[in-house]
Amino acid sequence: MSIAKHRHTKLDLLSESSAANIYDVIITFLEDGRIKAPLTVNLNSFEPNLLRDSGFDLSGDPNEHYLYAWTRYFSSKRRKICTEFKLYFYQNRLRTNGLGIVSKIRLSTLLKKIHEKELLTNSKPHRFEIYLDNGLKEGALLFENGILMQFSTADKGSARNYYIKTVESNFDESTQFDMKKTNTNFVRSMFKKYDYANLSKKKCKSNHAIQKLICLATQFSDLLV
């Protein structure tokens, strides 16, 4: 999904830029299952009428499944991070939301920050399964709680790092859809699960991005077998 264009009106009073740190936003997303507070993305409400009157573009059937998506910038240490915030609706009822990450954010950096938060709060590790395509250039982490995080290598250059592409929710406000099951079915249809045995094979050992991911997962005891 490309970044949705939108028109500014008198109801769209809040800035595209948020003061929230992108890593904090993703970690909170991982803990809560979605972005709960509209102000996190500089909105007063997730109500569809507000979004429609504010001029945001709609994709899909307004009487069935549809979404609003638009650009939001979050802070990082040295730069602004461009994201695509997505709100999913079914028959005018909010279902869930998700994040598309446009700027480059290293998966390894996020995993380190997740672990730092776990240590700081003495909380349970966020364990996950690793899924990869045949070329080892794209994949996903399927977290134990059903959150789906897709990643890929850079379009150009060597595959030394994985970068986050999307963060998809495990939560459905309407209670009509099992998002954890949906995410699981999606990732298993797109990628192959890689356990320790698969990750120890020769082609994985020569891949710098995978070795970095394995090292972090092993160090933090996050990899589900």
Image (cartoon, rainbow, N blue to C red):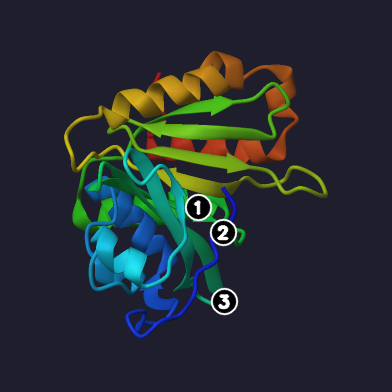
Tell me which residue sits at (18%, 39%) in the image: 174
In which quarter of the view is residue 182 placed? top left
Provide the secondary structure element on which disc 3 rests: loop
Disc on the earlier residue, 3 or 1:
3
Determine which of the numbered discs, if any, sits on residue 100 in the image. 1
Disc on the earlier residue, 2 or 1:
2
| Disc 3 to disc 1, C-alpha distance | 17 Å
User: What residue is disc 3 on?
Assistant: 79
Q: Are marks 3 and 2 in contact (CB under 8 Å)?
A: no
Residue 194 picture location, percent across and down: 54, 20
Determine which of the numbered discs, if any, sits on residue 90 in the image. none
Provide the secondary structure element on which disc 2 rests: loop
Mark 1: amino acid = Gly
| Disc 2 to disc 1, C-alpha distance | 9 Å
Provide the secondary structure element on which disc 1 rests: strand
Tell me which residue sits at (50%, 69%) in the image: 6
Screen quadrant of the C terminus: top left
Tell me which residue sits at (72%, 49%) in the image: 154
Residue 74 picture location, percent across and down: 45, 71
Task: Classify 10 Å Cα crowding around label 2: few (below 14), some (14-19), many (20 and above).
Answer: some
Task: Classify 10 Å Cα crowding around label 1: few (below 14), some (14-19), many (20 and above).
Answer: many
Q: Are marks 3 and 1 in contact (CB under 8 Å)?
A: no
Q: Are marks 2 and 1 in contact (CB under 8 Å)?
A: yes
Residue 15 picture location, percent across and down: 41, 82
Determine the residue located farthest toward the top in the rendered image. 197
Determine which of the numbered discs, if any, sits on residue 3 in the image. 2
Tell me which residue sits at (45%, 57%) in the image: 69
Q: Nearer the viewer, residue 168 or 197?
A: 168
